[in-house]
Amino acid sequence: MSTMSSNTVFLLVTMLLAMAAQCNANFPYYFGDFKLSIRNGFSGNIKLEVNCTSFDDDLGRHWLRKGETYSFSFHTDILGTTTWDCRLATQDAPLGTSQLFKCDYDFLKKCDFRECKWDVRDDTEYLLDIPQNKYVRWAHT
């Protein structure tokens, strides 16, 4: 292979890896280790069931009493396609499935590119905007 072909292949591979690193928004400073925390923030004595799944993982069901938090850590894939969908329910009714992690720059910025902290309240889920140090009501898209 000629030097020019080698350089072209190297540049192409480098560009593809950089594009695939969208989950690593501060690339190369930060490269894909995250923590996801879900807290039962209901006002009453309501238990929250959490069951989180990704493309290749199912973490099982976890019941949280008021004020308790369930947390787990993971590493994003090289293509930046990692998502975590969590089925939420109370002891009385299902609340639905919410995507609580995705490889999106604006979303990850709120998580300070390291930890996404959720508070499930009576009306909806709230995400801690770490740089602003305040919980924001999350509108799922």
Image (cartoon, rainbow, N blue to C red):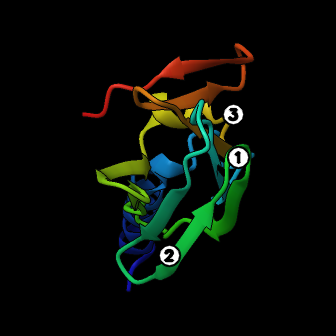
Residue at 50% of width from left, 76% of height from top?
61
Q: Is residue 96 left or right of residue 47?
A: left
Residue 10 seen by the camera = no
Q: Secondary structure at mark 2?
A: strand
Inter-mark Cα distance, 3 to 2: 27 Å
| x and y, in percent, of residue 112 in the image | 69, 33
Front one among 31 and 38:
38
| Discs 1/2, front | 2
| x and y, in percent, of residue 5 in the image | 35, 72
Vertical placement of residue 19 versus 106, above or below: below
- Tag shown at residue 112: 3
| x and y, in percent, of residue 45 in the image | 61, 43
Front one among 21 and 33:
33
Q: Is residue 115 left or right of residue 8?
A: right
Q: Earlier in the sequence, mark 3 or mark 2?
A: 2
Residue at 69% of width from left, 60% of height from top?
71
Q: Are marks 1 and 3 in contact (CB under 8 Å)?
A: yes
Q: Secondary structure at mark 3?
A: loop
Residue 120 seen by the camera = yes
Inter-mark Cα distance, 1 to 3: 5 Å
- Tag shown at residue 114: 1
Which residue in the structure is indicated by mark 2? 61
Circle 3 crowding by C-alpha within 10 Å: few under 14, some 14–19, many from 20: some
Residue type pointed to by label 1: Arg
Circle 2 crowding by C-alpha within 10 Å: few under 14, some 14–19, many from 20: few
